[in-house]
Each structure stands twice: as structure tokens, then as C-alpha cells.
Image (cartoon, rainbow, N blue to C red):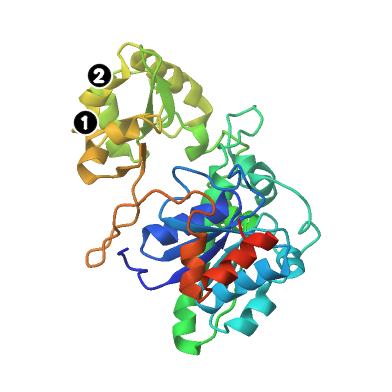
Amino acid sequence: MSGPLEGLRVVEIASLAPGPFAAMILADLGAEVIRVDRADDAGGLLAPTGVLDRGRTSISVDLKSAEGRDVVLRLVETADILIEGFRPGVAERLGIGPDECALRNERLIYGRITGWGQTGPLAHRAGHDINYIALSGALHTIGRAGERPLPPVNLLGDFGGGGLLLVMGILAAVHERSVSGTGQVVDASMVEGAALITAFLHAMHASGVWDGERGENLLDTGGAFYDTYECSDGRFVAVGCVEPQFYAQMLEILGLADEPDLPFQYDLDNAEKLRERLAEVFSTRPRDEWTELFHHSDACVTPVLSPWEAAEHPHNAMRGSFVRVGDIEQPAPAPRFSRTPAADPTPGSTPGADTESVLAALGYDKDAISSLRATGAIA
């Protein structure tokens, strides 16, 4: 392992989406991550194989058994960070909550990721990304004018407002521990993370710039200069020429610079007329031809690439923005560091593949490991 987090040990209790994403980032940046898979998860359903599990070792433990709980607490004694994504109270009922872990390791950073947070009227309710971003106010803003809100896959709550927020909180707590010498609990809520991402919209609204309903503002497709357009081959380009000088360059390349009847760029009341004209012109050429025409300009026009195409774009290819791990092309570790670069990720272990080696490193001898297997505490 290498990277700026080399030397940190993370215990990840297997979960879905935001927790594994946070652990992946920590592993990418050099931390040693040991994932605790459930002994009864024979199909590896909680292990997001191929990408989110990269860079980890895995042990399979029955968290409901006393012996399995003790294995996790033994791991905690050697760890800097623990990540769990249970509903509030579940980790405590299993005997691996913050208080139990702090008794074993007062320096432990205990990272918790949930949709609603550890407290509040909804804390124990089920939910998914779409529910969390709905309550945060973020979902309301996404979609076309006059149409229903459009969920942005599950990227905004699970990953942007969830996993990334948890990583930020954990690293802040690691820094604070370097001063105090004591760990603490990080309570990352996807509602609050998604709400945090909308801070810019709150500022725009307070200044009177974001007053319209969904799809009627500058950056939510209310303006024709910030939208996507279909090309002759059925693929799309993204237009984001917010500033007048960039907008002028776009019109020049499109051959519309001298067209007298175009509405003013920021005239949102007549944006549909401008949108229709732009759509008409963009529909005359295939996407890659437009890409070439705009390549050397500041017009802020780019191809809309699928996640599977993105690695092939010359810019991404030159920077190595995507890497092949095993047989899967996937995003490379980010951000980049000048002195302590992250190593290329390695494929994650299958659930339980490293149980014996991890336990041996903790001091369990062969007889003890055999006994744990016989009782079903490990698998």
C-alpha cells in the first residue's frame, strides 16, 4: 500500500453503497481496510464485487455470536477507524457500538453512515437515496419545468452526500485526535450531506437569483445555454456557456453569431425559443463531429459520455483517470498527491478469504481458529 493514509487501519462492517464507497476511498488513499463480512452472507450479497470492494481484505464473522463479537473487538483494539452502516441501535445490540469499542480503544474514530442520522423522528425508518435527497430539498430542484422531480440515479445521497461526507468527517476526526489523543463518533446523515451540497442554491435563493420553480432558473435548464442537446446520431452534447464571452464563442462555431432574432442569452422568458434554435443546429451533425469542432474553444460544449465511454476520452486517457482493476475498467483513485501518490487499486478479496491470516495476525493460534470455525463464529 502507498498513499497519504498509509499507516491507518480501518475496520469496515459490511454494508451497502455509502459505507463501502467510503471504505474504498480510504483504501485507495493508502489505508489498510479489513472488511468484516457476515458469516451467513454466503453469496456475498453485501460485498459490491469488482469496484467498491477494491483494496480490502475480508473476514467472515457471525456478529450475533459472543465469539464473533470478540473477534471484531480484537480487531478494534488494533484499528484507527471503524465504519458501520446499521440502523441506529443495531451495532449497540450486537455489542460493537461506540461505547463497547471505546473501552477497547479510546483512540478509535467510529464512523456511522445512515440516511436520517442517529437521532430524530425518522432515525429508525427505512429509506433509500431518493427519500433522503427528497427530505434535504435537493430532489425538488432536479428536473424540467412543469415536470416531476427526476432522481439523479442514487449518486447524490448515497455517494456525494453519504460516503464522501463520511470520509470528510472521519479525516477531520483523525486530525482532531492528533491534538486530543482521543477518538470520537462521526454521525454522517445522507439527508444532511445532500442538504450541504445545496448550500449554493440557498445562497442564490437568498440573493434573489434562484426564484423560479424547478426548471425555471439559470442552471436547472431554465436557461438554454445550460442544457443538453441531441445530435444527428442520437447522442448528446452538454452546453454550459454561462459567461457571455463563452456563449459568444458557441454561437460563432454554430454559425449563429449574426442571427438577428435570437433571444438575449439571459432572457429566461424566451429561453424556449433559443433552445429550439440551438436544438435545430445541433441536430445537423453527429456528436463526435461537434466534439471536434468545439475541442479548441472555450465555448463549454462537451460530449455527453456514458460511464463506459469516459475512459476512452483523450483527456481522461492521458491523465489515467480510469484504471483497470482485475477485468473491470473503473474510476482511478482521486484526488492526486504530489509526494504520496496512491497506488493502483487491487481487486478486493471475496468474503472471508482472509479470515485465517487476519486472525493469526491478531494472535489467534490454529486451535483457536478451528474452534471459532466449529462454533460458526467465523466462516
Quarter of the image that includes the N terminus: bottom left
Q: Looking at the image, which residue sits at the far front?
A: 367
**Is residue 196 something one can see in this rendering?**
yes
Q: Amino acid at mark 2?
A: Glu
Between the residue at mark 2 and the residue at mark 1, the CA separation in whole angstroms equals 10 Å
Quarter of the image that includes the C terminus: bottom right
N-terminal-most mark, 2 or 1:
2
Circle 2 packing at 10 Å, graded few (<14), some (14-19), many (20+), is few
Q: Relative to 79, is 276 above or below?
A: above
**Is residue 199 something one can see in this rendering?**
no
Residue 193 x, y percent position in the rendering: 58, 57
Circle 1 packing at 10 Å, graded few (<14), some (14-19), many (20+), is few
Q: Please report the residue visible at 68 percent of the width from the left and 72 percent of the height from the top.
A: 97
Q: Determine which residue is flagged by label 2.
A: 289
Residue 295, numbered circle: 1
Q: Report which quarter residue 106 is drawn in.
A: bottom right
Q: Is residue 252 left or right of residue 135?
A: left
Residue 47 x, y percent position in the rendering: 55, 47
Residue 217, numbered circle: none
Residue 76 x, y percent position in the rendering: 56, 74
Q: Please report the residue visible at 65 percent of the width from the left and 73 percent of the height from the top.
A: 70
Q: Secondary structure at mark 1?
A: loop
Q: Please report the residue visible at 43 percent of the width from the left and 35 percent of the height from the top.
A: 266
Q: Secondary structure at mark 2?
A: helix
